[in-house]
Amino acid sequence: MKQFRIHPPRDPLKPSSQALGPPYVLLTHRNSIATPLLTLTRQIAERALSKKDGAAPSWIRHLILPDPDDPDSFTPPHFVMTAQMDPRAVVHQKSSRTRLAYYRLDPTQTLEALLQNTHFVEFPTIEVWEEFSGTVVDVQGAVTQTLDDDEPRPKRRKLSAKAGKQAINGFLGGYGSEDEGEKEEKPKAGLALLGGYAGSDDDDETESGDVKAQKGDAVEEEDALTDSDDGVEVEIDPAVLMELMRARGESWTQDVGDDDEVDWGASGDEHEPE
């Protein structure tokens, strides 16, 4: 006699945190041990589904039997059998209680080959899962694969539709923002530098223009004096004269006499008007 415990597949429309329903249990007698495990399981499932009482759930067909319209898309379920762990491996388990261990069974091999060197009580119990997660051991009881099926899985934080949309928009909006910000700032910095250079040039031109204007005024005043008619006596206020000399930046060392009349004639020649 053999026992098959077929676990229901997970409903994709339900949350992953929801526990699965109870397995469907089948007890069989007089099975050929020379038959591959997957073939034997299909024969048992077809007999259960063909019964008129309808006790077998319909999901067994989708889990074990291929789709007639698309047989190549079928993926075999996982077959495991309860096993005994090595006592030395139990000591190193994270949980204080003893974990269950399983043999992983290849569905393409015969039942006779799979049951060799295994240990079970009274009759073997074969479990069928769409996807198994648990501790797997070899025929010696040594752990070959450990999946944290007993550890509590972290709960996913549920977001409303509005909060989820904001999170996605924030993620997409932040992508590449640093690079774009740097690219936008660089031209501004360059324009600011060019503006600074242009401003400094304008300031220099303005300052040089003011100096030239001041020098030009002084030269024009001097030219106005020197271009006077020869021999013409011009009366100039000494204070104005000192201001003109100071504008030219020259040191005036000659003592100015008390005479109010200064001869500015060219080459020192006096020409009396006739």
Image (spheres, rainbow, N blue to C red):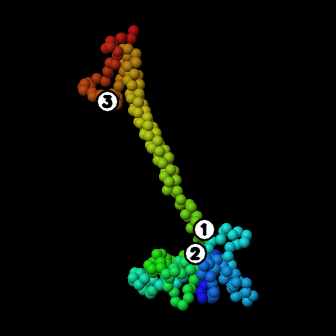
Distance CA(mark 2)–CA(mark 1): 50 Å
The three-letter code of the residue at mark 2 reads Gln
Element type where label 3 sits in the image:
loop
Which numbered marker is on residue 109? 2
From this viewpoint, is residue 158 visible?
no
Q: Which residue is mark 1?
A: 165
Crowding near the residue tagged with mark 2, few <14, some 14–19, many ≥20 C-alpha atoms within 10 Å: some
| Mark 3 and mark 2 residues within 8 Å of each other at the beta carbon | no
Nearer the observer, 253 or 205? 205
Q: Residue at x 46, y 39 (%)?
A: 198
Look at the image and tell me in which quarter the N terminus lies.
bottom right
Depth check, mark 2 against mark 1: the one in front is 2
- Name the N-terminal-most of marks 3 and 2: 2
Which numbered marker is on residue 121? none
Depth check, mark 1 against mark 3: the one in front is 1
Element type where label 1 sits in the image:
helix
